[in-house]
Amino acid sequence: MKDIKLKGSVLSYTLLILALLFFIFSPISYVKATSSTRYHAGYFYYEDSGPSVEGVQGNIFTIYPHVPWSEICAEWVTIVISYNYNYWVQTGYIHHWIWAIFFPILTVDFYIEENDNNGRSMKYPAIVKPLMDHTYKYKLLLSGPGEFTYYIYEGTNLICSGIINTNPYSTQDLQAFVETSVSSIKVDGSHFTYLRYRLTGSQWPLWDRHEPSWDYPYYLDQRGHYEFAVYGGG
């Protein structure tokens, strides 16, 4: 009887330790960036005089910059729903800080974010994380009334996909940008390629126009309508 009780106590103690370790090392909350300022470098599509588009797609090379405590660095493609109301939906990858119970850690995730009449929300749809020096393809498509479908690929392998509902929904413009919350983050190596737009139907032509934009201390290397690199910061 004593042996049974002893084994039961050891098992309970072991389970307690495992549970404690799980909670200590599992992220439970995300750290909001300290700075409300944002620095950007990239392309607007500006399709005002062109055909109506309903999707955006681009390949983004993953860099691993030094990101100070509580700051962020993200690279993304976006469909602008409304400039007047600052509504949009975007996908890409982000370096951000999270709390792991007692201490903060820097992590990187694929993400989907939207801002519409219902407010702003972000989610991290994949268990796997972006790997350094790997290129991933990000795609957003207006797939139905009030919904956008996102896809994230490495090569031809689909990592994750899903649906984001927005209110309202439209495709006023397309964007592809590097974003930081503090200018000390160095983004050398950032590289966007094969930017595409989705025409009504099934065509995905390469971007045939762009409007460049960058905030000092970041610089834009324009390599055509559908390719650019970003460097600077620090």
Image (spheres, grey):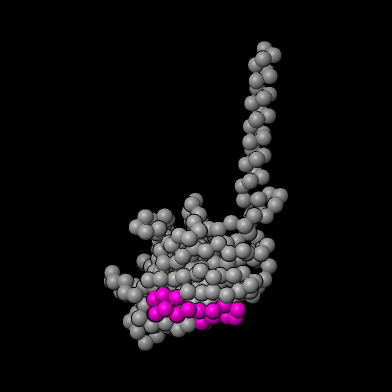
108 vs 39: above or below? above
x then y, percent, for residue 231: 54, 74
Q: Is residue 196 left or right of residue 116?
A: left
Q: Position of residue 66 (x, y in %)?
A: 62, 63
Rendering quarter of residue 122: bottom right
Give the left or right position of residue 126, taking residue 48 as reference: right
Q: Residue 5 placed where, x, y %?
A: 68, 18
Residue 73 lies, in percent from the top left, at 58, 67
Residue at the location (32% across, 71% down)? 204
For the point 52% across and 72% down, the residue is 178
Q: Quadrant of the N terminus?
A: top right
Magenta segment includes 222: yes
For residue 77, side relative to residue 38 (left or right)? left
Q: Which residues are magenta?
A: 213-228
Q: Is residue 28 above or below residue 49?
A: above
Which residue is the extreme one toward the right? Answer: 102
Quadrant (top left, top right, bottom left, bottom right) of the C terminus: bottom right
Identity of the residue furthest to the bottom in this view: 49
